[in-house]
Amino acid sequence: MSDPRVVGLPSANSTERMVNLESAGILRFSDRKRGTNPKIAFAREGVAHLLAEAAAALPDGIALLGIEAYRPPELQSLYYDSYQAKLRGAHPELSRAELDALTSRFVAPPEVAPHPSGAAIDLTLCTDEGWELDLGSAVDATPEVSQGACYTNAVGLTAEAARNRRLLVGTLSAVGLVNYPTEWWHWSFGDRYWAMATGASAAHYGIVTE
């Protein structure tokens, strides 16, 4: 996310409305982050349409489970600074530029982060009853904790986890969502990373404030 090809892209700052994915019946959401972020279920209308299409394409008995969509800018900054502080303690020899690049594998720099723009969602697969499927690592597991299993194309997964991950990737990619490859659960549309990945000249969405 700190790559100049991403940071250097402009944003059109669309005024497209935010949609509550949960109350609209598009996705159910886990409660794990609701305590720190009551806005987890909100996303741009364009993202909502794509998620509805993806949810409808899944096999019977399997559903999308949202973890966190919109994230307020101040919370994004807190996540970024906290993770960077941990990395700084583990790697005191790194320059600021190297530390920023390492941090952005897992937490996007606040100024280009997709979540505060309503363009991104962290999600996984679950049964119709809400039981989460095995996708090879916990959602939000860092590269260090997961030993690289958080990377979308990680090798060494169990057959079940690999099958479930292929289903998630195939379903979301088919509707036009873009994955951030160090986090299998992170998908977006209309943000700067999406623009870089798809060759668009600009991001659709800018940061949304309260």
Image (cartoon, grey):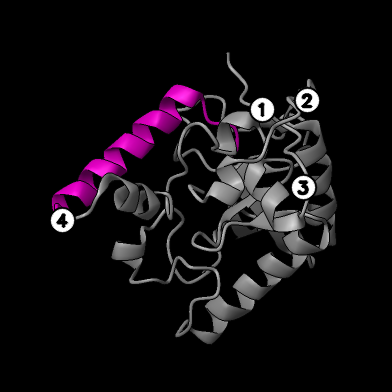
Which quarter shows the C terminus? top right
The Cα atoms of the two marked residues, 2 and 3, are separated by 19 Å
Amino acid carrying mark 2 in the image: Ser
Looking at the image, residue 105 sits to the left or right of residue 124; the answer is: left
Q: Give the range drawn in magenta.
A: 69-92
Q: Please tell me how crowded label 4 is: few (under 14), some (14-19), or many (20+) other residues with Cα within 10 Å.
A: few
Residue at 30% in and 50% down: 99
Q: Which amino acid does label 4 sit on?
A: Glu
The CA distance from mark 1 to mark 2 is 7 Å
* Mark in front: 2 vs 3: 2
The residue under label 3 is 51
Q: Which of marks 4 and 3 is nearer the N terminus?
A: 3
Q: What amino acid type is highlighted by mark number 1?
A: Gly
Q: Mark 4 points at which residue?
A: 93
Cβ–Cβ under 8 Å for marks 4 and 2: no
Residue 90 showing in the rendered view: yes
**Which is more N-terminal, label 2 or label 4?**
2
